Amino acid sequence: MRLSHIIPGRLDTCLQLYRLILCKCDPPSIRRLLLLIPELRDLFYCYPETCIRDILDQFPQPIHNLLRASYALHDVAVAKFDPHRTLELLEKVDITRDWCALYPRVLRLGDDPVAALEQLLGLEDDVSTAVDLYAQSINASVEMLSNPFARAQPISLSTTEYIRLASTFLMLNIFHQLRDMFNHHGEPNSFMPAFLRHLAPWQLEQGLSVESFFQRVISTRWFGPPPPLQLSYKFRRSFCIDPTFATSAYIQNYLEIIDGMSGYLYDPPGPGPLSFGQAIRAHQRCPRNAWDCLPHLPAPRFEVVHCHSRHNHLHSHGWAYFEQCHSNGEVAAREYTRFFLELGFFFWDKERLDHWGIADPDEFPRAMLMLKETIEAVKRAW
């Protein structure tokens, strides 16, 4: 029975039921239902804005907001992009947190609702796949510390761990979208101070962790799992990549993005488009090891301002662990890179770190000694 044939008094009930069905389904089911059930398809075309918002509401709020911001930036034509107006917006608000409040509507005039929904769900699916690949690879590296030659078992992320990871992947996606748009107008790095200013300290570190991971993935010939905690190398055009990583659209897009960068996380900022890590260094929002390896830069301040309180679920036990170790003067540049960045320390819950046996900050010196001994043992074995 089509919507046009439903008795008016029962129409509201049917609409509520169909909306409930849509907003409770996972993305693959939503696609199938819209394809197979004419009534749902009718409802979607009659109320596309409401339906899309209902569907996106099933995702945690940070991910919902970031998906919408990324979708909006993706569909802006280069010729219609206004860098000056965008820069003014970035200076006033954090679009990674406040996009939904700033722009309540998802669809713009002329948008195809089905194409818009497919793009939003496709992006979420790409990010979810990349997050899982990241988590499994990091877990494999950590398991190597206790038994370098054992096969690591897959892990399941907690809700908070997934939110932290997915939010970071989407934040980096938006960073590169903005960089590309500004680059077309000859100003690739002009937005970066305003964009970075709104990010909490742990969000900066989380972004550096993901960027460090992908640079390590594409610059070493060891994949799934890579050797434990390899330092980053320069990008090479000819590289071998594990088929598992090749299935991720997010990772493939990232490879294309970094091919045009002027440098990488540990390189001095250059004249061309900057990576996320370079942008942080260039604008003096440096990681905590700044005074260890960049003596010409002042030690940055890392106060947590009031506007970040709404996203404290992104603040992990790993960050608290790092704070305590750093306050004890135990974190030098090498340890920061090998232990905190390359283990994605800023994403994990206490339960995860307990399982790995590295949850107690007082045990940090012992953990670093174990790390050094394991790396040396693996090098000798290989």
Image (cartoon, grey):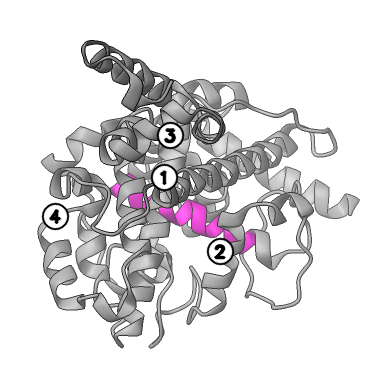
Residue 152 in view (yes/no) = yes
Identify the residue at horizontal 45%, vertical 42% (top origin): 166
At which x and y percent is residue 69?
Answer: 30, 53
Q: Which residue is mark 4?
A: 93
Foreground tag (3 vs 1) = 3
Foreground tag (2 vs 1) = 1
Q: Which residue is mark 1?
A: 117
At label 4, counting other C-alpha atoms closer than 10 Å, the crowd grade (few under 14, some 14-19, many 20 or more) is some
Task: Say if mark 3 contacts mark 4, CB within 8 Å.
Answer: no
Q: Earlier in the sequence, mark 3 or mark 2?
A: 3
Foreground tag (3 vs 2) = 3
Q: Earlier in the sequence, mark 3 or mark 1?
A: 3
How far apart are the alpha carbons under marks 3 and 1? 12 Å
How far apart are the alpha carbons under marks 2 and 1? 20 Å
- The reply, left or right, for residue 42 in relation to residue 266 is left
Q: Is residue 204 magenta?
A: yes
- Majority SS type along the magenta span: helix
How far apart are the alpha carbons under marks 4 and 1? 26 Å
Q: Which residues are magenta?
A: 201-216
- The reply, left or right, for residue 312 in relation to residue 333 is left
- Residue 253 is tagged as 2
Vertical position of residue 134 compared to residue 359: above or below: below
Foreground tag (4 vs 1) = 1
Q: Is residue 176 magenta?
A: no
Quarter where residue 234 is shown:
bottom right
- Residue 41 is tagged as 3
